[in-house]
Amino acid sequence: MTTDELKKLQAEMPNDVLIKKVRHQISEMARTGGRSHIMCVPPEITDTDMILSELVDRYEKALGNEIE
């Protein structure tokens, strides 16, 4: 999967699904002391870093502060 395809899949994820996944990952990381952090190679749209990054990207856009 290309980077563009991955970004497209992330962008297509509904907000409610993204929020649910982020909340679950935060709970799991707190419960496991961070050991549940998921980072696959190649990356998947459900990796911890990917869903957190997508959430931040959407929040920045909602605020009108698109920072790179």
Image (tube, grey):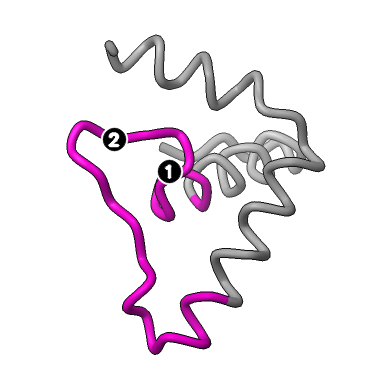
Q: Position of residue 68 (x, y in %)?
A: 41, 37
17 left or right of 9 in image: right
For mark 2, give the secondary structure.
loop
Q: Which mark is residue 19?
A: none
| Percent of width and height locating residue 23 | 67, 64
Q: Quadrant of the N terminus?
A: top left
Left or right position of 7 against 14: left
| 2 or 1: mark nearer the eye | 2
Percent x, y of residue 17: 74, 41
Which class describes the residues within 10 Å of circle 1: few (<14), some (14-19), or many (20+)? many
To which residue does mark 1 refer?
Answer: 50
Numbered range of the magenta stretch = 28-52
The reply to whether dot 2 and dot 1 touch (C-beta < 8 Å) is yes
Q: Could you say where residue 12 lies in the image, as x and y percent from the top left?
A: 65, 19
Residue 61 higher or lower than 19, as above or below: above
The verdict on residue 31 being magenta is: yes
For badge 2, the amino acid type reads Pro
How many numbered marks, from 0 up?
A: 2
Looking at the rendered structure, the secondary structure element under dot 1 is: helix
The relative height of residue 8 versus residue 68 in the rendered view (above or below) is above
Residue corresponding to mark 2:
43
Task: Report the residue at 63% width, 65% height from top.
Answer: 24
Q: Is residue 50 magenta?
A: yes
Q: Nearer the viewer, residue 56 or 45?
A: 45
Q: Give the residue displayed 37% in from the left and 80% down from the top.
A: 34
